[in-house]
Image (cartoon, rainbow, N blue to C red):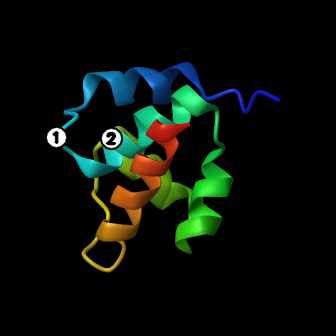
């Protein structure tokens, strides 16, 4: 199943700095085709929050930072 990330989101993610944890999360999720809704549900945030993370507009706050790092690590192992 393809979640059909929009070209604008993929472009914004590629253009953004990979130093941002949210951007790194976005790259991993786009590569693995994990939906924004799935990520939002997992972290207990809105889809818009995840979009903003993926684009580098905002970053995960300190409350979820470590969980995001572990999530990315688990995706990169697969």
**From mark 2 to mark 1, how far is it between C-alphas?**
8 Å
Q: Residue at x 42, y 32 (%)?
A: 27
23 sits to left or right of 71: left
Q: Is residue 23 visible?
A: yes
**Element under disc 1:** loop
> Hey, which quadrant is residue 35 in on the image?
top right
In the depicted structure, whether residue 42 falls above or below residue 77 = below
42 sits to left or right of 22: right
Q: Position of residue 50 (x, y in %)?
A: 48, 54
Q: Residue at x 53, y 27 (%)?
A: 31
24 or 77: nearer the viewer: 77
Q: Which mark is residue 19?
A: 1
In the depicted structure, whether residue 46 falls above or below residue 71 = below
Q: Which residue is mark 2?
A: 23
22 sits to left or right of 47: left
Q: Position of residue 26 (x, y in %)?
A: 43, 40
Q: Position of residue 58 (x, y in %)?
A: 28, 55
Mark 2, Cα crowd under 10 Å, few <14 / some 14-19 / many 20+, is: many
Q: Is residue 45 visible?
A: no
64 or 58: nearer the viewer: 64
Q: Residue at x 22, y 46 (%)?
A: 20
Contact (CB < 8 A) between labels 2 and 1?
yes
């Amino acid at each position: 199943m393809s979640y059909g990330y929009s070209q604008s989101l993929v472009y914004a993610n590629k253009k953004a700095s990979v130093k941002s944890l949210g951007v790194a999360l976005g790259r991993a999720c786009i590569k693995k085709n994990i939906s924004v809704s799935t990520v939002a549900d997992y972290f207990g945030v809105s889809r818009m929050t995840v979009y903003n993370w993926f684009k580098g507009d905002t970053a995960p706050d300190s409350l979820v930072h470590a969980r995001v790092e572990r999530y990315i690590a688990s995706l990169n192992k697969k």
